[in-house]
Image (tube, helix red, strand yellow):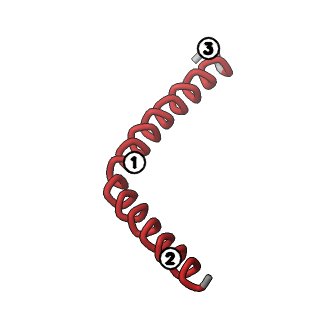
């Protein structure tokens, strides 16, 4: 019974280590994707604000 528990704990530790290594290896890619998405979002927000400003003051 204790051996099964020990094997399970070792398995969890190994799994956590593998997941951590894979996540660290892909972190740069995910950061780049997030950076691009944020830039696109900010550009859309600027365009929306400019469009809303023009609608609010049509004579300008």
Residue hosting label 1:
30
Considering only order in the chain, which callout, 3 or 1, is on the residue closer to the N terminus?
1
Compute the Cα span from label 2 to label 1.
33 Å
SS type, badge 2: helix
Depicted 53 relative to depicted 8: above or below: above
Residue at x-position 40% and y-position 45%? 35
Is 13 placed left or right of 29 in the picture? right
Residue hosting label 3:
59
Farthest residue to the right: give it.
Answer: 56
SS type, badge 3: loop
SS type, badge 1: helix
Q: Residues within 10 Å of mark 3 (few under 14, many from 20)?
A: few
Farthest residue to the front: give it.
Answer: 1
Could you say which is closer to the camera, residue 17 or residue 27? Answer: 17
Could you say which is closer to the camera, residue 56 or residue 8? Answer: 8
Could you say which is closer to the camera, residue 46 or residue 39? Answer: 39
Compute the Cα span from label 2 to label 3.
75 Å
User: Which percent across, then down, holds residue 7?
Assistant: 50, 76
User: Which percent across, then down, holds residue 40?
Assistant: 44, 33
Depicted 19 relative to depicted 10: above or below: above
Considering only order in the chain, which callout, 1 or 2, is on the residue closer to the N terminus?
2
Q: Quadrant of the C terminus?
A: top right
Q: Residues within 10 Å of mark 2 (few under 14, many from 20)?
A: few
Residue hosting label 2:
7
Q: Residues within 10 Å of mark 1 (few under 14, many from 20)?
A: few
From the image, state whether disc 2 or disc 3 is nearer to you: 2
Could you say which is closer to the camera, residue 8 or residue 57? Answer: 8
Residue at x-position 47% and y-position 70%? 11
Considering only order in the chain, which callout, 3 or 2, is on the residue closer to the N terminus?
2
Depicted 13 relative to depicted 30: above or below: below
């Amino acid at each position: 019974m204790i051996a099964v528990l020990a094997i399970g704990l070792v398995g969890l530790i190994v799994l956590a280590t593998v997941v951590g290594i894979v996540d660290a290896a892909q972190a740069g890619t995910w950061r780049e994707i997030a950076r691009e998405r944020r830039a696109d979002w900010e550009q859309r927000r600027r365009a929306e604000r400019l469009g809303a400003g023009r609608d609010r003051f049509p004579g300008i």
